[in-house]
Image (spheres, grey):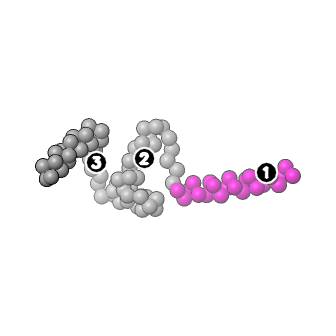
């Protein structure tokens, strides 16, 4: 049983390595603090936040912070309400 498990784990690791790549980045203390501060405000891990930024940049998209997204939704709701009142 133990041998089957070991074989399964080895196959799993080989398959995982072929599908995923690991990247290591080095930041100085100030850079890391800046990422850490923003990621805490976004309620995500630093690594997740940096990955989101990298993917957004790769796709040439702007990453909008959650706080601003919430404010935009509220503003859009208000605009819809105003438009409904004007049309009536």
Task: Tell whether position 19 is magenta.
Answer: no
Residue 11 lies in what quarter of the image?
A: top left
Q: Position of residue 77 (x, y in %)?
A: 69, 55
Q: Which residue is mark 2?
A: 53
Marks 3/2 in contact by CB < 8 Å: the verdict is: no
Q: Farthest residue in the right direction? A: 88
Left or right: 87, with 81 as reference point: right
Q: Farthest residue in the left direction? A: 3
Task: Tell whether position 79 is magenta.
Answer: yes
> Considering only order in the chain, which callout, 3 or 1, is on the residue closer to the N terminus?
3
Residue 83's disc is 1
Residue 34, visible in the rendered structure: no
Marks 1/2 in contact by CB < 8 Å: the verdict is: no
Q: Nearer the viewer, residue 3 or 18?
A: 3
Residue range corresponding to the magenta coloring: 66-88
Left or right: 49, with 14 as reference point: right
Residue count near mark 3 (Cα–Cα under 10 Å), binned few <14, some 14–19, many ≥20: few
Q: Position of residue 40 (x, y in %)?
A: 42, 62
Q: Which residue is mark 3?
A: 25
Secondary structure mostly taken by the magenta-highlighted segment of the chain: helix
Residue count near mark 2 (Cα–Cα under 10 Å), binned few <14, some 14–19, many ≥20: some
């Amino acid at each position: 049983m133990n041998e089957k498990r070991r074989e399964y784990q080895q196959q799993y690791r080989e398959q995982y390595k072929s599908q995923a790549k690991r990247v290591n980045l080095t930041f100085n203390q100030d850079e890391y603090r800046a990422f850490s501060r923003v990621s805490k405000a976004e309620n995500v891990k630093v690594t997740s936040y940096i990955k989101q930024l990298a993917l957004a940049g790769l796709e040439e998209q702007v990453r909008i912070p959650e706080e601003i997204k919430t404010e935009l939704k509220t503003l859009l709701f208000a605009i819809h309400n105003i438009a409904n009142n004007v049309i009536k």
